[in-house]
Image (cartoon, grey):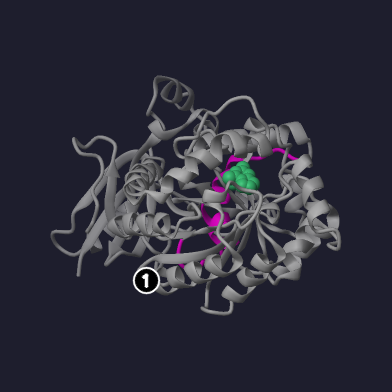
Amino acid sequence: MKTTALRGRIVGFRDDPFLQPPSSCLQYEPDGLVLIRDGLIASVGPFAELAPTLPQGTPIHDYGDAIISAGFVDAHVHFPQFGVIAAPGEQLLEWLERYVFPAEARFADETHAERVAGLFLRELLRNGTTTACVYCSVHPQSVDAFFRESERFNTRMIAGKVLMDRNAPPALRDTARTGHDDSLALIRRWHGRGRQSYAVTPRFAASCTPEQLEAAGDLLQRADGLFVQTHLSENLAEIEWVKQLFPDSASYLDVYDRYGLVGERTVLGHGIHLAEQDFCCCHRKGAALAHCPTSNRFLGSGAFRLFDARDGRRPVHVALGTDVGAGTSLSQLATLGEAYKTAQAVGRGTLGAIQGFWLATLGGARALQLDDRIGRVAPGFEADLVVLDPGATDLLRFRTEQGGDIEDTLFALMTIGDDRAVRATWVAGECVYDRDRAEPFAPVT
Ligand code: GUN
Ligand code: FE
């Protein structure tokens, strides 16, 4: 039995701060201890109370005034687009054609896929992200490469092969049949193996024929606990195109719904231009929207209406996504900063720090129906943790030394913080990333 302890300022949540007064949702332990046993959190409490009860010889990692939080959840990101980040000058459809498809075509080469998977996963960990919903390329070997890398760090990851049988270059197209069969083989190989889960991944309605969407719906019957991830109502030209491709559907969301693709564990990227009926449908079905603010601003797609989505009369699950390569950072802190600015521009509510950190941790976990395993610093939860240093940069240190409370410090982190503020990342009770080590990354297998 392996036992470890972390000491620091512990931040967590007991409730949904969009539905309850935010300050009543925060759990804060100014000098706390997290005891980890066999990858799970065994106990959490004040250092002074817990320290004397530790088994003799338990190593204590003392992080001083750094903040210990549940690891970040990134609900929408494309690993083959790691090298496409910062491609200028286009909106969604032109950007896909000009930059994304050529980059994704290179993932037919497994060596390339392996190299990028290694870089990508390390970049997630360097940013404190311990769980992500990941789009791979159309090539099954890109999924193998990604899950193999995730297994090396024992991270809880959700990923799938993109399905696209039309409106893409020939080299990137599958067919309804090969897409189905390749996905099924991947499900059998990876879904539920260790901490890996499979997501059936129709890229978006415009890249899938009705036959392919039907086959995607079929796949969901093949195993328990499968996820679905796709894009929804991101860009006005895209929405118009989908209307032409599926003239019988009542809405963009209805395209997916007709094929049984909207339910719990469905993660819909963007959802910018939605009607009230769409929010109601997502609420009723338990589907989640992934809010991708850096991407939405980079591509000029529009502004996600976070506070309308989370309306207490029919709250929709919302998680935070970086959407790299349209997104400009894998940092959930940077993403929160953009989410804050988007909410300000929309004018339907101000995104406070408690709501922000909840979205990036427990809210994300809840949106993915994983809130019984991850997202909390509490006994029985998987020990996926991020340690945030409020003095990481001169600016952060100066700003947080002015004497604010924990909420103020979290707000500074989500506004001017980024990867530099991540001191360490723990996965299933192992420190897999430490900023200050000579070799920062430590795979476990
Ligand atoms: N819609 C379909 N494919 C994509 C993609 O790769 N990125 C984004 N942002 N939107 C999409
Ligand atoms: Fe995307």
What residue is shown at x 86% (from left), y 63% (from top)?
A: 248
Residue 145: percent from left, percent from top: 35, 55
Location of residue 444 by image quarter: bottom left
The residue indicated by pointer 1 is 193
Crowd tier of the residue under label 1, counting other residues whose Cα lies within 10 Å: few below 14, some 14–19, many 20 or above: few
Q: Nearer the viewer, residue 234 or 383?
A: 234
Give the residue at the far left of this rendering. 57
Can you see residue 149? yes
The picture places residue 408, in percent across and down from the top left corner, at: 54, 34
The stretch of residues the image draws in magenta is 349-374
- Residue occupying image coordinates x 64% and y 35%: 340
> In this rendering, is residue 40 above or below 88?
below
How far across and how far down the image is residue 330, in percent? 47, 39
Relative height, residue 190 to residue 168 (above, below): below
Q: Nearer the viewer, residue 332 or 27?
A: 332
Does dot 1 land on a helix, a strand or a loop? loop
* 46 sits to left or right of 365: left
Image location of residue 214, percent across then percent down? 67, 71
Residue at 33% of width from left, 51% of height from top?
A: 426
421 above or below 212? above
